[in-house]
Image: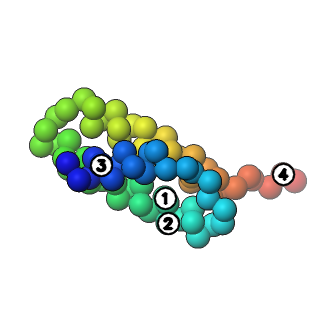
Amino acid sequence: MDVIDKALEFEQRKLSFKNTSERIKASREVKALILSLNEVYKKQKEDHIMDLMKRLTTVKRRIEKRLKGRPLTA
């Protein structure tokens, strides 16, 4: 259950990434957590693991949206 503890800790962490490199590191970290949780979920099939993966995915989407930035308007 070490992966679940790491995922919960990441979720509770304050998400104020000041620069691009911190955002990239956070995006990679949350991606690795989601993939490892998926492996655990395949074995155990528990709903709380799926809920945790969904919450982490929304965090990942917010980080990646911020990384991509706003499109330029002509």
Q: Give residue 73's mark.
A: 4
Residue under the point 13% across and 38% down: 44
Q: Tag 3, which secondary structure?
A: helix
The kind of residue tagged 1 is: Ser
**Pointer 3: residues within 10 angstroms few (<14), some, or many (20+)?**
few
Q: Nearer the viewer, residue 33 or 11?
A: 11
* Mark closer to the chain start, 3 or 1: 3
* Mark closer to the chain start, 4 or 3: 3
The kind of residue tagged 3 is: Asp
The kind of residue tagged 2 is: Lys
* Mark closer to the chain start, 3 or 2: 3
Q: Nearer the viewer, residue 48 or 70?
A: 48
- Return the x and y of residue 5 as percentages of the image width and height: 30, 48
Residue under the point 57% across and 51% down: 15
Q: Are marks 4 and 2 in contact (CB under 8 Å)?
A: no
24 relative to 41 in the view: left or right: right
Up/down of 54 relative to 69, above or below: above
Mark-to-mark CA distance, 4 and 2? 29 Å
71 relative to 60 in the view: left or right: right
Q: Report if residue 34 is visible in the image.
A: no
Mark-to-mark CA distance, 4 and 3? 43 Å
Q: Nearer the viewer, residue 54 or 18?
A: 18
Q: Give residue 5's mark.
A: 3
Mark-to-mark CA distance, 1 and 2? 5 Å
**Pointer 1: residues within 10 angstroms few (<14), some, or many (20+)?**
many
Quarter occupied by residue 52: top left
Q: Give residue 25's mark.
A: 2
Q: Give residue 27's mark.
A: 1
Q: Give residue 12's mark.
A: none
Q: Are marks 1 and 2 in contact (CB under 8 Å)?
A: yes
Q: Report if residue 1 is visible in the image.
A: yes
